[in-house]
Amino acid sequence: MGQNGSEVQPVSNNQQLYQKVAKTSKVVTIFWSIIIFSPVLIIFSPLWISAFSVYWMYSYGTGKHPIGADLVDLARDAILETVDEVKNKVEQLGKDITKDIVKISGGSDGGEKG
């Protein structure tokens, strides 16, 4: 009997051999799967990336809120805010230039008297 009262069954040499063969075959299978699958993945990666991009845009457009949609919304809001600030600045500069032109021309008709 073992220390905790349960009987420990000895592992036979054949069983150990089978376990080693199983582990080795598993490792070899995984290794060759990676070797074969990696080039296929690399060759078709432009297709996968394009397909995923189209899927993501479709999901975003239909309101399904895919991963990263929060960042896109945040960037869009920042761009719109910047555009609004630039628009206001240009309008203000336009008004200032108009005032300066009117001030410079004063009461004259803008032409030379001769």
Image (cartoon, helix red, strand yellow):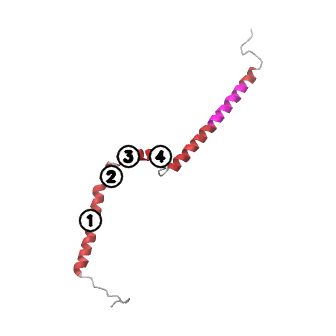
C-alpha gap between disc 4 and disc 1: 42 Å
Q: Which of marks 4 and 3 is in front?
A: 4
Farthest-out residue, right: 107
Q: How far apart are marks 4 and 2 (CA)?
A: 26 Å
Q: Earlier in the sequence, mark 1 or mark 3?
A: 1
Instruction: In the rendered structure, find residue 28 and report the number of the disc placed on it.
Output: 1
Magenta region = 86-100
Q: Residue at x 74, y 10 (%)?
A: 113
Indicate the secondary structure of the residue bearing disc 3: helix
Tell whether label 3 touches label 1 (CB within 8 Å).
no
Q: Disc 1 vs disc 3: which is toward the camera?
A: 3
Marks 4 and 3 sit apart, C-alpha to C-alpha, by 14 Å
Q: Are marks 4 and 3 in contact (CB under 8 Å)?
A: no
Q: Residue 60 carries which label?
A: 4
Badge number at residue 41: 2
x then y, percent, for residue 44: 32, 48
Q: Which residue is drawn at 29% across and 63% down?
A: 30
Crowding at label 1, few (<14), some or many (≥20) Cα neighbours within 10 Å? Answer: few
